[in-house]
Amino acid sequence: EIQLQESGPGLVKPSQSLSLTCSVTGYTITSGYDWSWIRKFPGNKMEWMGYISYSGSTNYNPSLKSRISITRDTSKNQFFLQLNSVTTEDTATYYCARVAYYGYNLDYWGQGVMVTVSS
Amino acid sequence: DVVMTQTPVSLSVSLGGQVSISCRSSQSLVHNNGNTYLSWYLQKPGQSPQLLIYKVSNRFSGISDRFSGSGSGTDFTLKISRVEPDDLGVYYCGQGTQYPWTFGGGTKLELK
């Protein structure tokens, strides 16, 4: 069974960088699907942040393009999110998920990690 | 970006009843390849979102046939029949036709 698990600090100071890890089990991230980050803000709004493909290419939401980086470590079957220069508006629950191109949707999700940006 | 508008924002239902949730997109969701990439997700309390429906009307693995999706172009509907307690939570539509992918604002399903 495919499982994804996010990890990282729950509190980040304004202007600093947010760094999260998604660990994938039950599927090798180089095997043919892409891997995405999504966040849900307080109040239910959800935002697709970007993905890293099975081959290592990336695609980001233009609203974040100057601040976001998604990378991976294939030896550990993990992929990562870095978001720079965070503000309080980046406070959200962050999810990693698998991108399924049979439907251009997100078919397996992690449990999410809540990140608060505050001094 | 494609704006996804869901109505209603919240919905009260009796167990065993039926509900419909509407999702409208600001642009047609028909992809160049002819497919329509509209999905529905449910986030139950304390859990992560789960995929229910993809490509308008296809149920994801393990999803009950009480959930059905329909629609075309810019206008889509999720119907839930014989509502059970485990169906409660926030429902989202999402589009994968055009980057950046976008989601509706959510519809909270509660018990009457």
Image (spheres, coloured by chain):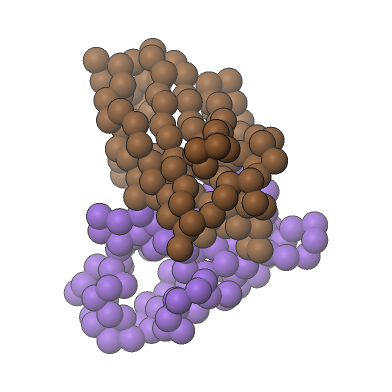
Chain colours: A brown, B purple
Q: Picture coordinates of residue A33 (x, y %)? A: 63, 52
Residue at the far right in the pictured view? B33
Q: Quadrant of the N terminus of chain B?
A: top right
| Vertical position of residue A72 compared to residue B98: above or below | above
Q: Nearer the viewer, residue A96 or B6?
A: A96
- Residue at 47 percent of width and 24 percent of height: A83
Q: Is residue A72 left or right of residue A8?
A: right
Residue plotted at (43% across, 50% down) = A4
Name the image quarter holding residue B11: bottom left
Q: Is residue B71 visible?
A: yes
- In percent of width and height, residue A65 lies at 59, 26
Seen from the viewer's position, the closer of residues A103 and A80 is A80
- Please give the name of the residue rendered at 52% of the width and 71% of the height, measured from the top-left corner: B60
Q: Quadrant of residue A12?
A: top left
Q: Is residue A76 above or below residue B76?
A: above
Q: Left or right: B65 with respect to A31?
A: left
